[in-house]
Image (spheres, rainbow, N blue to C red):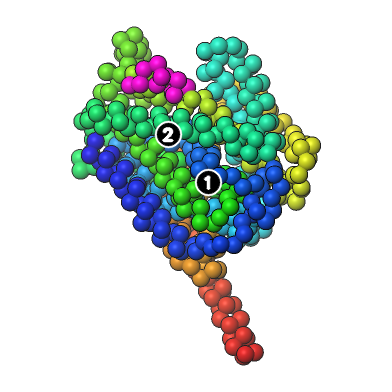
Amino acid sequence: MITFLISIVALFIGYTLYGRVAERVFGPDDRETPAIRRADKIDYIVLPGWRIFMIQFLNIAGTGPIFGAIMGAWFGPSAYLWIVFGCIFGGAVHDYISGMISMRHDGMGQAELTGLYLGATARKCMVIFTMMMMVLVGAFFVYCPAIILAGIWGEKMMWVGIIFVYYIATTVMPIDKLIGRVYPLFALSMLFMVVALGIVLVIKQPVLPELWDGISNLGAERLGLKQSIFPALFVTIACGAVSGFHATQSPMMARCMKSEHQGRPIFYGAMVTEGIVALVWATISNYFFFSEGWRSACSPETIAQFEASGLSLIQFFDAPTVVNIICYSWLGTFGSILALLGIVAAPITTGGSSFRTARLILSEAFGLKQTSARSRLLLSLPVFAVGIALLAWQIGNPSGFGTVWQYVAWGTQAMAAVTLWFCTVYLTQKHRCYWLTLIPGIFMTMVVVDFLLISPTTFHLPAVPSHVIAAATTLASIARFIWWKRKFDKKECMLQNKENTKS
């Protein structure tokens, strides 16, 4: 419990101190923002700062810092280190710098920024990759909430239809009409849930594994977890530490800000807030799985079902089940409503934002104007068609989509690595401290390559060859950057000499 409290304080200090370091490195100024310069009352529109913060928080959060933190805590106290240090030095920097670069380029999306700073080939790959990711996220977040809602009232396919209609509305309508009004309310409910659960944790003061008890893989020792801490932990906890999905969402808010000085509280601040959400749920997970919290939180019927199942704790109690049990047990009927909002509303809003992002990616890739509702709807139709096809496949193959979703978790971290690299190139070109993004970029490159090689759902190589190949690939990336930087510095020096000669 002490580790949890220290971690919360560390995030606040990180926002106050390192957030200012990131701000100084980037150097926001008083230039006119895209929301003012390109105002179209559709995607480019000035919104109040608090509203932008709430939308940004919900867009990047969803259920990620809840489910990911619950599963990441299976590894033990080491999850605290990743959430705190990953958030402060990786995720929040990633979100802030990429969001501000997007603002400097008229709200340009992640794929186009990749092309601008890493080349045309990288742009093409990222357009395809991000489109695939957005549609996968959107399709996944239709069916799962529909199943839950059908268990309360109505038919499953009825809810699928309702959610899809909502997705169409959020994708096509001006951002201030639906997203700007509904998302802040859902974000507020999620924050209230987290604060309430945090207070209960402080009151309960449960005995939990602390950092000084060791950072070994407790899940392997007590829960039958077969994955190793590296690299699995760093992919399992994405939202709450580092997630490339955020870079696809930030451009939407970069088009709504009236001042660059709002960047630190909105981009860096929303990520730190997400880190706090992850810390609360990681601590709850520690209590539930390592301190036998499930015995006091579950009903006698649930305990009997678990003991008769022959399954391990992490096999029987998945992340959504833990959320539902804890919220109802700790917060009563009101808590169950909040759990419903967390499990249903959050993924639905994330899915809606994903489809809207997909529309924006297509409009940028092909240079299409989006001023009329008709043009936005027509551009969205192929996106929704693919989403419906994936949804139909998911309904027929529910277990198969679960496998696909594991690749999505890796995909978010791959996007984070790419984003950190183009941020590094940008800072280098602007003669800023590129180490700010280079160090986390190197780390994330190692993580995503290693996980791709070692994961049972991909190449499933032994640990040693995976680590060696990942390290070699990372070193090659560093060497490529050094080679590029030397060429860039030489070119800059030649240009400076020409200027001096002319003067």
> What residue sits right under mark 1 in the picture?
49
Residue type of the residue flagged with mark 2: Leu
Q: Amino acid at mark 1?
A: Gly
In this picture, residue 343 sits left or right of residue 175: left
Q: In front: 229, or 468?
A: 229
How far apart are the two marked residues, 2 and 1, measured between alpha carbons?
17 Å
Would residue 337 be counted in the magenta stretch?
yes
Q: Which mark is residue 191?
A: 2
Instruction: Name the residue located 34 percent from the left edge and 18 percent from the top edge.
Output: 329
Residue that appears at 75% across and 44% down: 370
Is 500 contained in the magenta span? no
Q: Earlier in the sequence, mark 2 or mark 1?
A: 1
Few, some or many C-alpha atoms within 10 Å of disc 2 (few <14, some 14-19, many ≥20)?
A: some
Q: What percent of the width, then of the height, locates residue 284? A: 32, 30
Query: SS at mark 2?
Result: helix
Residue 289: give x, y in percent of width and height.
30, 27
As drawn, is 398 to the left or to the right of 205? Answer: right
